[in-house]
Amino acid sequence: MKETSVLCLLFLISLLSCTTNQARLTVSPSSSQFFKGDFVSLSCEEDDSSAGWTLRRNTSKGQRTQCGDTWGKPAGSSCTITMMLHDSGVYWCESREGPISNMVNLTVTGGSVILQSPVLPVMEGDDVTLLCETKTTPSNLPAAFYKDGSLIRKQPTGHMTIQHVSRSDEGLYKCDISGHGESPSSWITVTDKHTTTPPPTSTPPPGSTSIPLPPSLSPPVLSVLSSLGSVCVVVLLVLLVLLVRRYVHRKPEGRVSIAVDSTVRTEDVSYEEIIIIKETEKKSKMRDFKPEPDGIYSLLK
């Protein structure tokens, strides 16, 4: 019975620890780069509003600050920002219970060219379109696209589509429009499943500093958090099977009196232990049996 109680306790603890709310940070317009003065809305799309999700960020001006402190205008689980150069940084949603959402890296430039690229990880096999855009002229100007510093191709219309992306397409992308300038670089992540692991910090625009990720939210920790759901399911199934087997094979218990060194004590024992004790007593009695001589004589006659 003690083992069964322990299993029940473990089952309940696992169930409680696996019940966590989830949130997803979205950016509108969906891009990882913005011009200075652009209007941007960030939202924590949550499964449970009672979790109290808050938008936080790391920038060159502050670590783990939340929307409404010195930046942005909060509205429930959303935040609107008029982007300035010091707004470049890492953004994420965080609940008061501790869990965090995916993280996004936003770059603000004072230049005249940006690269519009996916702000969230893209799935393997999907098509991805990159757009090289200027601030003051039409966005269909000829542009050159680069990956990890190497020229990929030149496009006459200012946009490039990568068909059926794979892991090899991950990297830092930027673009250049002749006569207008070069965009900052942004990291594109390709994944085969949804992940909360943040992409590496994009190369900051000229004149800005790199933004460190919060130590408590490092990629290894986030990888563990992302796999917690599947681990909890396995743990719960194993504990459930053990509970069922313990219930099916449980034997009735009894109480026996055991004499040890002329002292009699009563203990709770299982059905199997009672059988062993009875067999031991039987063998002991047979060893101690001494027949009388008359009895042996009568048997011989």
Image (cartoon, rainbow, N blue to C red):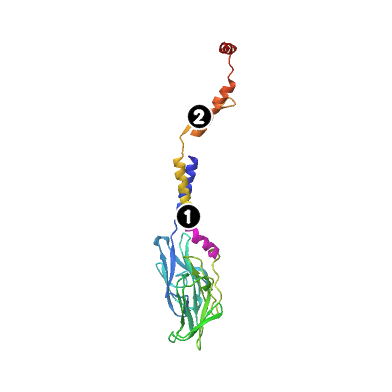
Q: Residue furthest front?
A: 301
Q: Circle 2: is it few (<14), some (14-19), or many (20+) Cα within 10 Å? A: some
The three-letter amino acid code for the residue at tag 1 is Cys
* Distance of label 1 from label 2 (alpha carbons): 42 Å
- Residue pointed to by mark 2: 256
The three-letter amino acid code for the residue at tag 2 is Val
Residue 79, image x and y in percent?
42, 71
Residue shown at the point (50%, 29%) measured from the top left:
256
Q: Is residue 218 visible?
A: no
Q: Are marks 1 and 2 in contact (CB under 8 Å)?
A: no
Q: Which residues make up the magenta segment?
A: 217-232
Main secondary structure of the magenta stretch: helix
Residue 53, image x and y in percent?
43, 64
* Disc 2, SS: strand
Residue 38: say if magenta: no
Q: Which mark is residue 41?
A: none
Residue 114, image x and y in percent?
48, 81
Q: Quadrant of the C terminus?
A: top right
* Disc 1, SS: helix
Q: Residue furthest bottom?
A: 179
- Residue pointed to by mark 1: 232
